[in-house]
Amino acid sequence: MTTPALIDLAVQRLRAGGLVGFPTETVYGLGADALNPLALRQVFALKGRPVDHPLIAHLAWQPEVEALLAPWAEVDPRAVALGRAFWPGPLTLVLPRASGLPDELTGGLPTVGLRVPDHPVAQDLLRAFGSALAAPSANRFGRVSPTLPEHVREELGPDLLVLDGGACRVGIESTIVDLSGTQAAILRPGAITAAQVEARIGPLAAHSDTRAPGTLPGHYAPRTALRLSAHPELEAAALSAQGLRVAVLREVEPVAYASRLYAELRRLDQHGVDVLIAALAPEEGLGLAINDRLRRAAFGSGPAGGDPQT
Ligand code: TXA
Ligand code: MG
């Protein structure tokens, strides 16, 4: 349970340049003052993340979306339309950045990623803090994102203050829409689908030239070898017949699959099996985002790990 006293303690730590783990509706974030370069450098150090990977600035909700965006980015009518439709919620917008933002936040890019999370603990924290929090997923670089507070402690150690918001509702990271060019594009699929975005701002580009460094193959990787299959039970039977120990990850309904995906990957990864087999979701809507994460996880999986840098 996150009490007002814990929110106060978290705000004190953040104002002093410290880091705090907190829940969002997608995954747990590792929060730091988005305007404090030294605090941001600690985020990269604790995660083991390359410093040129930009962070998302998380903002407290207010219904005047122009006023919400203006201190951070160039205000664009498409951003206002998407903010009104989907914030607070699992959507990140990449926009030309306002002046005065630290390069540590934006990875030196001329753009900034902005998101208004809808978890009540995240909103309480942001309102009490009074400014933006940079918050990457609270995992070590290249590993599975945390969806429970104990995952954050497993990843980043027992000394970090982690606000408890229970299990994350969505379970996979926000949809990232790039609005820095003339045609909008999805940089990372998520629970807000391309069709939902297109319904508000018109057609999306099929590809974007924008760099989204976190969209590397080999992210979200378990240590156990992970295989993907449309028929996981058949594959499991074949591998078991060869004497391998196998565990299967599957869920029929995509919303439930997304919300349990990372916790199940973590749980099964500690099971001591030789191979994990995950069912692919239908290639549409939220299923596209689930399969995106599964493919990255499979690419980097296995005892030797993939190389998330390549
Ligand atoms: O759901 C989420 O977005 C979670 C929760 C905690 O809010 N956060 C998250 O942060 O997933 P992170 O740092 O793990 O992933 C951020 C992604 C990276 O792929 C990064 O490259 C991309 O956002 N990104 C951030 N700012 C960007 C920018 N200006 N241009 C392109 N990509 C950007
Ligand atoms: Mg991440």
Image (cartoon, helix red, strand yellow):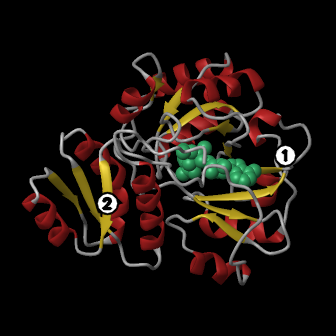
In the rendered image, which quarter is residue 56 located in?
top right
**In-image side of 215 versus 40 (left or right):** left
**Residue 127 location in percent, x, y?**
63, 38
Q: Is residue 15 above or below residue 81?
A: above
Crowding at dot 2, Cα within 10 Å, few <14 / some 14-19 / many 20+, comes out as many
Q: Which residue is mark 1?
A: 71
Q: Mark 2: which amino acid?
A: Arg
**Quadrant including the N terminus:** top left
Kind of element beneath mark 1: loop
Kind of element beneath mark 2: strand
Pick the residue in front: 234 or 289: 234
Would residue 117 be seen by someone viewing this image from the given angle? no
Q: Residue at x 13, y 66 (%)?
A: 238
Would residue 203 be seen by someone viewing this image from the given angle? yes
Q: Is residue 31 above or below residue 167?
A: above
Pick the residue in front: 78 or 129: 78
**Residue 230 location in percent, x, y?**
29, 75
Q: Residue at x 60, y 66 (%)?
A: 86
Pick the residue in front: 51 or 163: 51
Crowding at dot 1, Cα within 10 Å, few <14 / some 14-19 / many 20+, comes out as some
Asked if disc 2 and disc 1 are in contact, CB closer than 8 Å, the reply is no
Q: Which residue is mark 2?
A: 227
Q: Is mark 1 within 8 Å of ligand 1?
A: no
**Residue 208 location in percent, x, y?**
74, 68
**In-image side of 130 versus 26 (left or right):** right
**Residue 202 location in percent, x, y?**
72, 83
